[in-house]
Image (cartoon, rainbow, N blue to C red):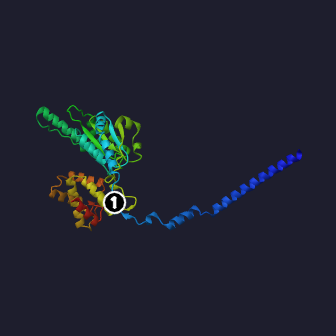
Amino acid sequence: MAPRGGHAAAAASSGSEDEEVEEAGFSRSYFLAKEKEPSSAKKRARAGAAGKLADLNLVDEQVLRESLAEIPPKHEKEIDALISSYKDQYRNWLFELRCGFGLLMYGFGSKKLLLEDFASTTLTDFTVIVVNGYLPSINLKQVIAAIAEIFWEQTKLKQKKQSGKKSQLSQNFASQSIDDIISFLNNQTSEDGHDGVCLLIHNIDGPALRDAESQQCLAQVSCCRRICIVASVDHVNAPLLWDKKMVHTQFKWSWYHVPTFAPYNVECVFYPLILASGGHAQTTKTALVVLQSLTPNAQSVFRVLAEYQLANEKEEGMPVSSLYTKCRERFLVSSQVTLNSHLTEFKDHDLIKIKKHSDGQDCLRIPLVPDALQKLLQELA
């Protein structure tokens, strides 16, 4: 019996040695193979030699956008049926607004036309204020002050009906703080029969509105009894803008999934396409969209500045005093305060740059090359 045990032990020992040899051979082969592989530094060097993304000859932004516009639309019947199904919900949306909820639309595709159609066909009893949240910069205080002006006009109209005389009271909301304006809005009642104001915000998650201060301000406005909010979102992280209190007790969002599959033609004007090179064409187009959203007087003031810059290319800029004089001569502004409000809008939208002249006075300059500025004036006309 002993020999058998010895043979068994020898066999076991032999098997163990074979496994160790095989494992050692595998390990050696593995490390030899790793030695033959190029290091990460060599890989990066080869990739760099092959070419960089910056070396690519990218197409001009305007050419790319024109090419995209020529792509024929697809699935038109299905999309029309989809939009029609949303329109069938208009009455339900209106009911939820009257119940104190806010409407928040999400889903792939631009929702701009859909929301504006809803406002023009269904929100006829409301005064609708449209906020384009996709713009690079927005003066939220001006928006809130505009709402307050509407209610103030309604208050004066109500007093006129009661007394038979036009009210001489006035309110300068532009000079008040945001907290004071919101306090005024909170005191408004619906006894006069007006339905109030609907704030229609395209892209409430836009770059100029997504900061905590702006969202808190809008949340406070949404709590006013005579103000309702209809908004859209497109950013994937949009829900992270609000905490539970803002969602449930302030905005009181009623979420609707409304994919339209419509192109973001207007919303993406301010964002360069990935496969396009930057250039003056994109800057000009962006400036044109901003200017078209301003008042005719503001556009005329901008034109005065642009014409001066084209006629005096070698100068550092147009002095503010000279701009004021020319605008007064053309009856575009009545005071320096009015001109300053226009300049603030221009500066907020990066349409102008302000710097000190060599003699110490402020000078204005439009950050566009002459050809681009000339084209902008032509398109603006």
Q: Residue furthest front?
A: 77
Q: Amino acid at mark 1?
A: Arg
Front residue of 146 and 112: 112
**Is there any visible trace of residue 169 in the rendered image?**
yes
Residue 86 position (above or below residue 292)? above
Residue 322, given in percent of the width and then of the height, sits at 20, 60
Quadrant assignment for the C terminus: bottom left
Quadrant assignment for the N terminus: top right
Front residue of 61 and 305: 61
Secondary structure state at the residue bearing disc 1:
helix
- What residue is at 41 percent from the left and 37 percent from the top? 244
Q: Quadrant of residue 313?
A: bottom left
Q: Dot 1: within a 10 Å radius of its alpha carbon, few (fewer than 14), some, or many (20 or more) residues?
A: some
Q: Quadrant of residue 243?
A: top left
Disc tally is: 1
- What residue is at 44 percent from the left and 66 percent from the top? 55
In this picture, residue 235 sits left or right of residue 185 = right
**Is there any visible trace of residue 353 in the rendered image?**
no
Q: Residue furthest left?
A: 164
Residue 111, given in percent of the width and then of the height, sits at 32, 47
The residue pinned by badge 1 equals: 65
Residue 135, given in percent of the width and then of the height, sits at 32, 51
- What residue is at 29 percent from the left and 38 percent from the top? 228
